[in-house]
Amino acid sequence: MEITTGWYLVLGALLFVIGGTGLLIRRNPLVMLMCVELMLNGVNLSFVAFSRTLGDIGGQTVVFFVLVVAAAEVVVGLGLVVAILRRQPGSTADDLSALKG
Amino acid sequence: MVELVWLIPALPLIGFVLLLLAGNLLGEPRAGWIATIAAGASFLVTLTVFVGLLGRDSHSGERSYELVLFEWLPAGSLQVEAGFLVDPLSVTMALFVTGVGALIHLYSIGYMHGDPKYSKFFLYLNLFLFSMLMLVFGNNLVVTFLGWEGVGACSYFLISFWHHRESAATAGKKAFVTNRVGDWGFMVATFAIWSALGTVTYTEIAKSPAMAATTGTTVSLLLLVAAAGKSAQLPLSVWLPDAMEGPTPVSAMVHAATMVTSGVYLLVRMNNVLTDDALIVIAVVGAATALFAALCAVAQHDIKKVLAYSTISQLGYMFLAIGSGAYVAAIFHVITHAFFKALLFLGSGSVIHGMGDEQDMRKMGALRLAMPITAATFIAGWLAIAGVPPFAGFWSKDEILLAAWEQKNIGPLLWFVGLITALLTAYYMSRQVFLVFFGDQRWDEEAHPHESSWTMTTPLCILAGAAIIGGAINLPLVKDWLVLEHFLEPVFNHPHQFSSGTITKVALAVISVCAGLAGISIAVLSWLTRRIPTDRLEPEFLENAMHVDSTYARVVGGIGTTGFQAAADIDKQIVDGAVNGVGKLTMRMAQFIRPAQSGYIRNYAIGVAVGALAIVVLLTWGLLL
Amino acid sequence: MVDTLVFVVAAVICLVGALGVVLARNPVHSALMLVMTLFGIAVQFVAQEAHFLAAVQVIVYAGAIVVLFLFVIMLLGVDRAQNLEMSFLPVQKWAALLFASGSLAVVVALIVVVGEPVTGVQAMGGTLGGTDDARLLARSLFSDYVYAFELTSLLLVIAVIGAVVLVRKPKQTNPVAAEDGGGS
């Protein structure tokens, strides 16, 4: 069986959906951030697959930028988590509902 | 060269912005110099534009140049541009506004020395100059109104510049509120002109056919209200004497030489819409104000209050000239008045400065020895305003009296009122000069009066020169010497022609000179040689400005308060009720959709996810099928 | 044949890791499972001749980001098991599962059934040559994408400053740390 681009794309989609589902059902803010990383990686995989198929380095360049943005996102996200948990130890994402309408 | 007109108001604006950003950093005296340089450069550009305008042919309408910067308010059939109109009238006004303005900036460098808000003062002065130039150069009523409001606001800032003084703060508010009445007139007049002619641009108004008699008269009277508010004519004259609470350079620039003449400028600019009926009203208002203010000036003790009432009186002359149809005479008097009144105010400022902030003339006397330059220049200004030939004031005042004499309906009466005013003017100005510079020394040795620094005396000397020879711009002796009249001619649809013969003219001139000399003689006898007892020459009734002020206060405080209360109640019940009702309705409706904001991040995330999925499905719908 | 084997093994590693991240009760386990997934993806990168990205994936993701996660977990002492039951959002779980199945169905349908117009196979212009990917990537980054590249450096600086401001211990007198800016 030959491995075509479609297989990679399906794998990426699976990772993306698993990450998205985790983001929606987990309440621990740290795990939610990890789920975001999963989603990003699913997309990265698709980009690399496209890059190879289309013979265009642009796809890999985008992955590179996603890496940088993910790093920045984690830095700020973890900073927020630390600041929040230090004030209200043991709180989950659902406890942060002060902006309720 | 005419195209440079935008630079004229831009320069003071740049100065203003500079001082706004870095005023405190620059400090004294650099802030003052920057403002002065901005004003001076503006004057030089105005000169350039003036020369450029002279280079154009005077008859084919080429001396009217419009520079449109951008569409300002394009709203349906109302098209307002932000643009400048360069024509002889606006350039003439701008020349003396920037010229006198620059001199007063220079003077202020010395006068405001040591003031804690030094840079802020120059900031306001530059902003004022900018607004005034917008007023003068605006090519339509709306741009002029922008400048009009700008000078009003700056006037307020500058009057209450020393706002820690209770009286200064109150005077500022009074000026502002009184000016609002005039602004109301301006706005309603603008609306009426637009609805009647469909334009607010000056050049198009000038080309428009005359309005219906009633509309025209209404518009003219509204313009008169506007002009009376700004130029302190009866019954809106009450604010100007109080405005003397501001620093003296402000009194000289804003409240004597430039801003208060904007009412005159407006009426002259709108000369094509003024109807004959309205002109009579304008003439009567002018004559009445001139006489009223001259009478009030007779009994004032404050050195600046005398000049303030004198300013109102002189503005009355200008209105009298407009009412008589002699627009050129009005502008001529605006210019000469700017010279000698700025001079007198700056001179009085020099005296106040030298005496250590003493303003009461009863505590002065014999100051000519201590301040020779101030005294000499002040005397030049005195002779100019008193109408002594060949000083500047004589020529312009004489022309106004002649125009008043020739007024069709009530000419001789107007002329007589003007003549009495001339006599009174000569009298009270002489009284002031004698009280301040001559007679006995009535101040303590501790006062140490001294001559002011060069930055203050230089403007005095320049203005004194202008006050002496300023009349030369419009000498009636030979037809070709009427430089100003010929220059301004293209502005007016129907140039005013003097119909009197030479004998009448000479006779009237002689009579007015005699009136002036009579005034001076009375003053000499009573205040210099003390032949006439002076006890009764300062009646309390006149010192209190005929109780106009207190009457206003009583009316507004009595009946007025009840009316204001009723208006406030209506506002609270009906207007606020409607506004609050709308708010409550919105809140009730919001209750329904409030639960959507659950506050849970994951709820929001699912919304985003579902939305994204929906978009994907939508985009690929064709492929999926 | 080797290709297929590599793909299948790496894909299984990825998916097990991903499910582990979501289902593990202890955040430490989640983090370790994340590392597993990331390694699997690195292998997939290598299989597609993106060697440079594979290396970066291991170094940055597994080496830096996950370690950062672990640091924070240890720092805050939240390495306790957490109940996965949805205590106060009962609808959320079902909505999430619905979304997951729905989106998966759509995407897989697009890839497998629709195929070429979506996957772009028809546009295939040959593979990127062998071990050359780092040079190509560098050329692309420093020519076509140079402004974006410079902007990411700005983004990183901002992120660092933001993190420092956020994490700073609040002063006693001033409960909101962020209010007095990034100074002192």
Image (cartoon, rainbow, N blue to C red):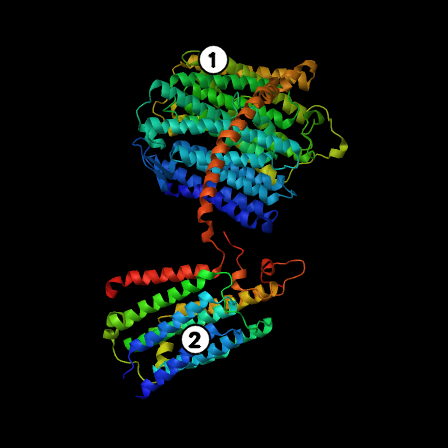
In this view, the residue in front, B379 or B166, is B166
Can residue B471 be seen from the camera position used here? no
Amino acid type at circle 2 is Ala
Dot 2 surroundings within 10 Å: few (below 14), some, or many (20 or more)? many
Q: Where B325 sits versus A74, above or below?
A: above
The residue under label 2 is C18
Chain letter for mark 2 = C
Name the side, left or right, on which B615 lies relative to B30.
Answer: left
SS at badge 1? helix
Q: Is residue B33 visible?
A: yes
Badge 1, how many Cα within 10 Å: few under 14, some, many 20+?
A: few
Q: Residue at x 37, y 71 (%)?
A: A43
On screen, B531 above or below C140? above
Task: Name the amino acid, label 1.
Answer: Ala
Q: Which residue is found at the position 53% from the left and 19% from the top?
A: B290
Q: In which quadrant will I find the C terminus of chain B? A: bottom left
**Where is B77 relative to B558, above or below?**
below
Looking at the picture, how far across and down is residue B622, in whole percent? 24, 62
Q: Which residue is mark 1?
A: B507
Q: Nearer the viewer, mark 1 or mark 2?
A: 2
**Up-down: is C34 above or below B51?**
below
Q: CA distance from mark 1 to mark 2?
A: 112 Å
Q: Is residue B281 left or right of residue B371?
A: left
Specify the subunit that label 1 lies on: B
Q: Residue A85 appears at what percent x and percent y?
A: 58, 65
Identify the mark at residue B487; answer none if there is no mark.
none
Q: Quadrant of residue C75?
A: bottom right
